[in-house]
Structures are given as structure tokens and as C-alpha cells.
Image (cartoon, helix red, strand yellow):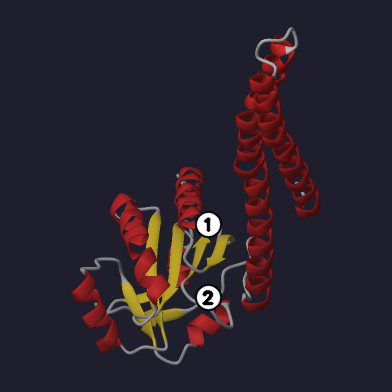
Amino acid sequence: MHTSLYNSFVLGNALLLFVSIGGVLFSAVLVLLRWNTPQRRAHATRLLIFTLMIPLLFGLQYVVQFWIYLPAVGREQMKAIQAARDAKFQESTKVLPGDAAPEFTLTDLNGNPFSTRDTHGKVLLINFFATWCGPCHAELPYLKQIWQRHQSDDHFRMLMIAREESAETIEAFRQQNEVTIPMAPDPTGEIYRRFASESIPRNFVVSAEGKVVYARSGFYPEDLDEMAELIEQALADAR
């Protein structure tokens, strides 16, 4: 429901409510004045009708406002927010679903070499984060759940990459937050810039064929739920 239409409804409903209240007062006076006349029944019926109209009009106002108008406004606002978010993502990302995942090599916190070439035939989840990033902290429990669920699966790999941070910094972060997910520093941001120009947290899921099948930025629980389901499907396809 458009705002102009809703405002017209509110005005019309308010006028009817005003008329109903006036009708109640007028009919009540007539009932008292003509109590002993034959017109008493007609005035009493009119009084009852106007009295019943008042709660009905309030109820109609409630239904239209809270069941129709506000949900419609909320949906329009969410569409606008989603459109702005999609536009920002398109501007900042360099890798979209369907693209081949950029290849890179680095060393994780445990001193183990990691290369995307070694993940061919496996489903790979890459998470870019920073230790100072609030949304990154917020999404960490979701990432832990995914890791706990699939860490023993030979078809699954996962790596958290700290953008422009040192190994010492993320080691402290790992211990403080009890993270067992493989982590690696990207001190110059070189790896990150192969995927995007700005904005974290950022997640990419790469299929066993080396194609990106999921790419999102920011912390949105619904996105992470979607990502978890997509990983399940990608693993089923990889087996």
C-alpha cells in the first residue's frame, strides 16, 4: 500500500470515527429526551449502530496499519537496502559466482603451505577477515559451526585469511577466541586484492571444479545460512 493511499484511508477512517462518536452523543441525547415516545426504539437502534462502529473502525485501522501498510513499507525498505548492498558488492568484488577462483599460495599459522592448486577436487571456503572487525567477530560462531561439521571431510578445505595483519596478531586472536580453523596472514593484502577491493568480512565458496559458487560480503545471518546449505550441496556433488 502506497503512503498516499494509506494517508487517504487514515483521513477517511478518522472522519468516519468522528461521525460515529458524534452519532453516539446525538443518539444518546435523543434516547433520553424521547424515552417515553414511540421513536425511542429507533433512536436506541441508531445509538447501538454508532457505538458498534467505533471499535470496528479502530479495529480496521489496526489491521490496515499493522497487517498491510507497515509490512509493505518494510518490504520496500528491505528491497532498497538489498539493492544498495548488491550495488556496493558489485563495485567492490573482483570475483563473482561462475568465475574461476584466483590461485594463490601462502603459509598458515602452523607453518603449513597452502595452495589453491592443492584444493582441486575439494570444496573450499575462503574467509577474509580482520581481528579489529566487529562484523568479523559476529560471524565467527557461524564459521566455527561449519568447520566443526566438515573438518573431518576429506572433500572439504577451509581457510581464514587476515587481511593486512601479521602472524603474531592473528595468533593472539586465534588463542583468545579458541579458533581451530586454519588461519593465515595476508600482511600486504595481496591475496585479498585478487578477490576484492574493499569490505570485510567476505566469504567465497569454491567448488571441486575450481569455480566460485558463492560470494558475499558483510555479516548477514541469512547469508551464512545460505552458505552453509550451499556447502552441503557442493560436497554432495563432489563425492
Query: Disc 1 marks which amino acid?
Result: Ser
- Looking at the picture, tell me which residue is in the foreground, 48 or 29: 29
- Looking at the picture, tell me which residue is in the foreground, 133 or 117: 133
Extreme residue in the bottom direction? 188
Residue drawn at x 70%, y 17% is: 34
Q: Disc 2 marks which residue?
A: 103
Q: Quadrant of residue 3?
A: bottom right
Q: Disc 1 marks which residue?
A: 207
- At which x and y percent is residue 2? 77, 51
- At which x and y percent is residue 229? 47, 47
Q: Are marks 1 and 2 in contact (CB under 8 Å)?
A: no
Which SS class for mark 1?
A: loop
Earlier in the chain: of badge 1 and badge 2, it is 2
- Looking at the picture, tell me which residue is in the foreground, 152 or 62: 62
- At which x and y percent is residue 137? 35, 71
Is residue 97 depicted above or below 7 in this figure? below
Which SS class for mark 2?
A: loop
Residue drawn at x 27%, y 79% is: 109
Query: Disc 2 marks which amino acid?
Result: Glu
Residue 53 shows in this picture: no
Image quadrant holding the C terminus, namely: top left
Residue 92 shows in this picture: yes
Q: Is residue 128 left or right of residue 52?
A: left
Residue drawn at x 74%, y 36% is: 19
How much space separates mark 1 and mark 2, taking CA atoms?
A: 14 Å
Number of numbered discs on residues = 2
- At which x and y percent is residue 53? 67, 27
- Circle 1 Cα neighbour tier, 10 Å, few/some/many (<14 / 14–19 / ≥20): many
